[in-house]
Amino acid sequence: MKAVQVTGYGDVDKLEVVDIERPSPKANEVLVKVRACGINNTEIWMREGAYGTGSKSGWRPEGVKFPRTPGSDITGEIVEIGEEVSQTMMGKSVVLFPFTSSGEEGAEHISEDMSFIGSEYDGGYAEFVVWPADLCYDMPLTDYIESAVFSVSGMTAWHMVEQIQPDASETVLVTGANGGVGSLNIQIASRVFGAKVIAVVGDLALEGKMKELGATHVVSYKSDNLAEEILEANGGPIDSVLDVVGDPLFNTSLHVLKKGGKFCTSGSAGGQKTELDLRTLYLKHLTFYGSVLGTREEFKKMLQAISEGKIKPVLDRTFPLSEAKEAQTYFKQSGKMGKIVLLPSEE
């Protein structure tokens, strides 16, 4: 089968299209013909070494073993099953829950042995992938590409909103609002939890699209008076921040938060290190949440909300598997709207 492998830490030249043996499912696994695989920051940071220190990076302390096939937002068709898997799984169109864990229900994502597809396991930048049958769920939509934009980004966004627990009386500031996680943060916070949302983007030409997703106000991080514009839009301090940008908007976010406000981060696309005046934290009684991925129960809630039409796919563009380098390069450019998806199977 065709696959894209990361051969080591570095730039996109570490991505190689190769011909390798098709995997076979173990007793409790299925073989999935990959129809679509969304691109996430996680596989780019894995390649760049951003998830570790020194010579190791990955979700586990030992680091990634190369070569590794990346890709975690996977949809496809089950074409082979292991001997312990029910025959009813054959031919199903599925979306893959993206990690294994021995953690108890509700704590799967913080278990020490949490292992991620595309990092600790070979992932979806390939024509086929094997995965445990019990981690394969019915697709929430009939389209493979549309269903592939949700799994990692959607579960991350869902867990972020669950952490801050907004309601209809509250306002949430969403940074990186035009990205994969940010566009879902808007929808989940507004359409599922009922909160008012202020979206932060770079280009105000996206204002209409942001409001279609559920934002009530849209501001640009390029503004010289960003904090003042946020406070004016809300008529005062905001209740919570959902952040994926990191350093560039960190101080502004804390400035516009009310006393007792909540700050939740699941990414640092604009800068991984920042400065914090601890007086801001304790004098404003702020609560900080570090957030990544989520639980299987949250994943199922998200799939249900998608199937009910409360959350809609936001797709920027697709690339064929052979253009994985170009796809990851494009992913890092600013001004996109929604997810980038690879198509390993294009018949």
Image (spheres, helix red, strand yellow):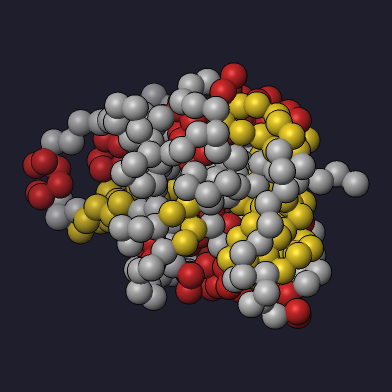
Image vertical order of residue 296 relative to residue 157, above or below: below
Tally of marks = 0
Q: Residue at left 53%, top 49%?
A: 121
Horizontal arrangement in the rendering, residue 155 relative to residue 29 (left or right) = left
Horizontal arrangement in the rendering, residue 82 relative to residue 272 (left or right) = right
Report x, y in % for residue 10: 48, 22
Q: Is residue 36 visible?
A: no
Report x, y in % for residue 104: 35, 74
Q: Is residue 129 visible?
A: yes
Q: Residue at left 64%, top 57%?
A: 130
Report x, y in % for residue 158: 48, 62
Q: Nearer the viewer, residue 55 or 106?
A: 55
In the picture, the quarter occupied by the N terminus is top right
| Quarter assignment of residue 244 | top left
| Quarter assignment of residue 18 | top right
Q: Residue at left 66%, top 41%?
A: 125
Q: Residue at left 61%, top 51%?
A: 73
Report x, y in % for residue 33: 76, 55
Image vertical order of residue 74 relative to residue 125, above or below: below
Horizontal arrangement in the rendering, residue 283 relative to residue 55 (left or right) = left
Horizontal arrangement in the rendering, residue 167 relative to residue 201 (left or right) = left
Image vertical order of residue 343 relative to residue 19, above or below: below
Image vertical order of residue 119 relative to residue 137, above or below: above
